[in-house]
Image (spheres, rainbow, N blue to C red):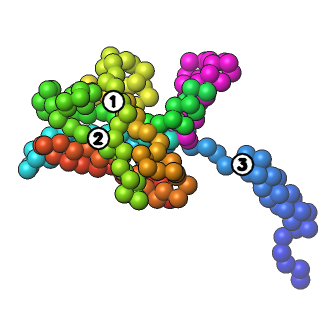
Amino acid sequence: MKTGAPRGLVPLFVLIVLSLSACAANKGVVKPGYPEELENWTRTVKVFEGFETRLYFSATYKSPSFRESYIDRYVEGYGLGETYRSALIERETEQGAGYNEFFFTAYTPVDEWNDFEKKESIWRLYLEDDTGARLAPVSITKLDSSDAVLREFFPYFDLWSSAYIVKFPKYAPAGAEPIPGPDTAFMRLIVTGVIGKGQLEWRLK
């Protein structure tokens, strides 16, 4: 007595498997969408003085993959053409090559404490890597709180927070290698002041 699948079904099964494999190969690796990139590159920390919250701080590192995803989302959302996409790519590539850039939001229970853009701010920001190199900001710019586009792209920017862009140099004063470099394991954004201290870490390897 013969057992097993009917003779015609085996070739059909093999054909289906090969077809699905070919489709998977053609699709390749699917890039993460903007929400995934935003989550991957965003960190949050609460700074306490005793048992009191003094600062609620969230930051997104504008990595190359984040910038690429941001451009895709922006161009798609506004129905822009390739000319505009090329201009955005040129701008973001230039910014990424020159600076380590973070978008961040800050909430403080006292409005006067939310003053990161001021030279005499009660807060200090630093960027560190796993070698101990520490960078001070080149600039900190406060953004328009009424900008609806910012809230669309950074949903954690709520009505009680202020938003900023901070730029750090790519190189330490005596450094020959960029920060981060190909061997950098992690970076830390340090926020510190007389009323508290916190840090956010991005693992790169």
Q: What's the CA distance linking mark 3 and mark 2?
A: 40 Å
Q: Quick one: which residue is furthest to the front in this view?
A: 174
x and y percent of residue 82 in the render? 68, 21
SS type, badge 1? strand
Considering only order in the chain, which callout, 3 or 1, is on the residue closer to the N terminus?
3
Considering only order in the chain, which callout, 2 or 3, is on the residue closer to the N terminus?
3
The residue sitting at 43% across, 39% down in the picture is 169
Which amino acid type is marked by label 2? Leu
The residue at which mark 2 appears reads as 125
x and y percent of residue 48 in the render? 15, 47
Q: Which residues are magenta?
A: 64-89
The residue sitting at 37% across, 57% down in the picture is 132
The residue at which mark 1 appears reads as 140
**Label 2 close to label 1 by CB (< 8 Å):** yes
The residue sitting at 86% across, 57% down in the picture is 15
x and y percent of residue 79 in the render? 61, 18
x and y percent of residue 59 in the render? 35, 39
